[in-house]
Amino acid sequence: MTDRRQFLGATAAASGFFAFGPGSLVPRTATRLDPDRLPDVGSAPKPLRLLILGGTGLTGPHQVRYALARGHTVTVFNRGRRNERLPKGVEELKGDRAARQVDALKGRDWDVVVDNPTSLPFWVKDAASILKGHAGQYVFISTISVYDAAGQQSITEESPLLEYRDGDPLAVTQEQFSKDVETLYGRMKTASEREASKWFGNQTTIIRPGLIVGPGDGSFRFGYWPYRIDKGGEILAPGDGTDSIQIIDTRDLAEWTVRMAENGTFGTFNACGPRASMTMAEQLYGIRGTISGDRDIRFTWVPADFLASHQVTPWGEMPTWLPRSEPEHVISKTSNVRAIAAGLTFRSLAISAVDSLTWLQALAETTRAQVIKNAGLSEEKEKTVLAAWHQRATR
């Protein structure tokens, strides 16, 4: 995979950004998070009736546990294939939005709907047309990949979006999307945002996360770095360390989403972290300082052009990283000012790194091996590229 959007689109289609099919990058056994262990948080000022569409992916289980801990009543609507990830006390409604089976939503009322897994605008239409008048707020979880980064120096909520110009986006089928996910991913999210706003108007909240990391992320898009650093030795690091990165812990996103519901906050928000800018070097040295112990750990920074000449891909084989030469590098400079003003908070890099590694290490050996294949450099390729770099450096 050659670029961020291609990698993101491919992992999205396979791993459960949208639907959790048999080709998932995140095996069903890949969670060792205790579903019944609720976070120690105070009660919300007012209990809400929450409907969570999805709820069993990367962020959903954290939403559910946090909402229950805050005293809310939680109903989930999904296909029921991974509901073992949910704690006791959650009402389960079964349906399949991809197959347009949403009748279980009829005749019910909720205070807030949280739409996690939508890949296509007809998913929103089918659900929202039933829920309009039966819920006071529709929270749509989108992505910063809706932005058209070409020519942009920074990204705010008002930046240009990718548009679908080949007909009615509501007519795009699941099959079409699966065949051309790299092109359609951001465009369909844009159209889905608009569909949510069409049905719920000023009662809509649109949240655009950046790269989501933390325990439960079987795509290995961030976990590669704690894993690789924990192994020690010489580590290939991309670029010169000054490229900016953005990540958000799945628990920060989940908990803030619930608080947005509690506060009745509407509008559009970029959910990106950390609070202040972070460079690639700050990320890697920060992780090393957290989990390295007394082991020999050395970073060898290799320029982007050399990596490209050896077919080392940004974002895929070098997770979280985009070189400044990439047109989408600006996606790593997305403004989170509005979200912070609305109460978005951030765990430390140390917590995200340690918890990601702990989660990975708790997996069954075969499952862990599957996850490790999803991103990052193989041991053999890393050695080959480092050897080539050292050979060039000694000429």
Image: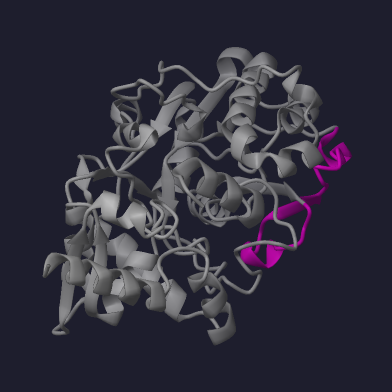
Percent from the top left, x then y, of residue 212? 44, 49
How many numbered badges does the structure rendering display?
0
Q: Residue at x 66, y 59 (%)?
A: 89
Residue located farthest toward the front when viewing the structure as drawn: 395
Residue nearest the observer in this picture, 90 or 173 = 173
Q: In terms of image quadrants, where is residue 50?
A: top right
Q: Residue at x 67, y 14 (%)?
A: 198
Left or right of 186 in this view: 342: left
**Residue 46 against residue 266 in the figure, above or below:** below
Q: In terms of image quadrants, where is residue 140?
A: top right
Q: What is the quadrant of the C terminus in the image?
A: bottom left
Q: Residue at x 73, y 43 (%)?
A: 179
**Residue 118 against residue 21 in the figure, above or below:** above
Q: Was residue 94 drawn as part of the magenta stretch in this picture?
A: yes
**Residue 37 against residue 222 in the figure, above or below:** below
Magenta: main secondary structure equals loop
Residue nearest the observer in this picture, 78 or 73 = 78
Left or right of 11 in this view: 284: left
Q: In terms of image quadrants, where is residue 104?
A: top right
Here the colouring is: one colour
Q: Was residue 171 drawn as part of the magenta stretch in this picture?
A: no
Instruction: Give the magenta-colored segment's residue range.
Output: 79-106
Left or right of 288 in this view: 394: left
Q: Is residue 133 visible?
A: no
Percent from the top left, x then y, of residue 265? 46, 25
Percent from the top left, x then y, of residue 357? 37, 72
Q: Residue at x 52, y 27 (%)?
A: 206
Percent from the top left, x then y, of residue 282? 17, 54
